[in-house]
Amino acid sequence: MKQHCFLPKSKLGIWSVILFVFSILALVFFFIMVNVFGQRGGETFFSNLTLTIPMLSAWTASTISFVLGLVSTIKSKSESVLVILITAITFLITLYGIGAVL
């Protein structure tokens, strides 16, 4: 029986995890700006760049993390539990982002 490892060993898997952590940090920054500093959006999505940039960064990093995790799982046959979990989470985030844009 093959043993599954928790942490990724492939470069793509490691980058997938790094980008996922970055996206979480960007979301935390967004919520700090809203809840602590009282930032609010304007009439359009790009009205307040202090809120727009972290949200776009988080969504972009999540999408790239999904792609890298998927490629790592398929191409490198990565069986890292963390990469598989992050790939599933970022897949849902990517779907939500596409749905929000449409």
Image: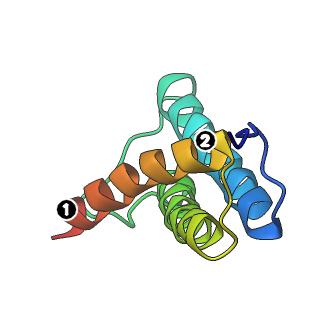
- Looking at the image, which residue is at 72% across and 60% down? 13
Residue 72 lies left or right of residue 53; in this view the side is right
Q: Nearer the viewer, residue 34 or 61?
A: 61
Q: Nearer the viewer, residue 6 or 90?
A: 6
Q: Residue furthest left?
A: 102
Tell me residue 91's x, y (percent).
39, 56
Which residue is denoted by mark 2 in the rendering?
24
Residue 71 placement: quadrant: bottom right
Q: Nearer the viewer, residue 77 or 43?
A: 77
Question: What is the spatial separation of the Cα atoms under label 1 and label 2, in whole angstroms?
Answer: 20 Å
Q: Height in image: 68 above or below 9?
A: below
Residue 7 placement: quadrant: top right
Q: Secondary structure at mark 1?
A: helix
Tell which circle, 1 or 2, labels the residue nearer the N-terminal end. 2
Mark 2 surroundings: few (<14), some (14-19) or many (≥20) residues within 10 A: some
Residue 12 placement: quadrant: bottom right
Residue 25 lies left or right of residue 56; in this view the side is right
Snapshot colouring:
rainbow
Q: Height in image: 38 above or below 17?
A: above
Mark 1 surroundings: few (<14), some (14-19) or many (≥20) residues within 10 A: few
The quadrant of the picture occupied by the N terminus is: top right
The quadrant of the picture occupied by the C terminus is: bottom left
Q: Height in image: 70 above or below 85?
A: below
Q: Residue furthest front?
A: 1
Residue 4 lies left or right of residue 97; in this view the side is right
Q: Secondary structure at mark 2?
A: helix
Residue type (three-letter) at the residue carrying disc 1: Gly
The total of numbered circles placed on residues is 2
Residue 89 lies left or right of residue 30; in this view the side is left
Residue type (three-letter) at the residue carrying disc 2: Ile
Which residue is denoted by mark 1 in the rendering?
99
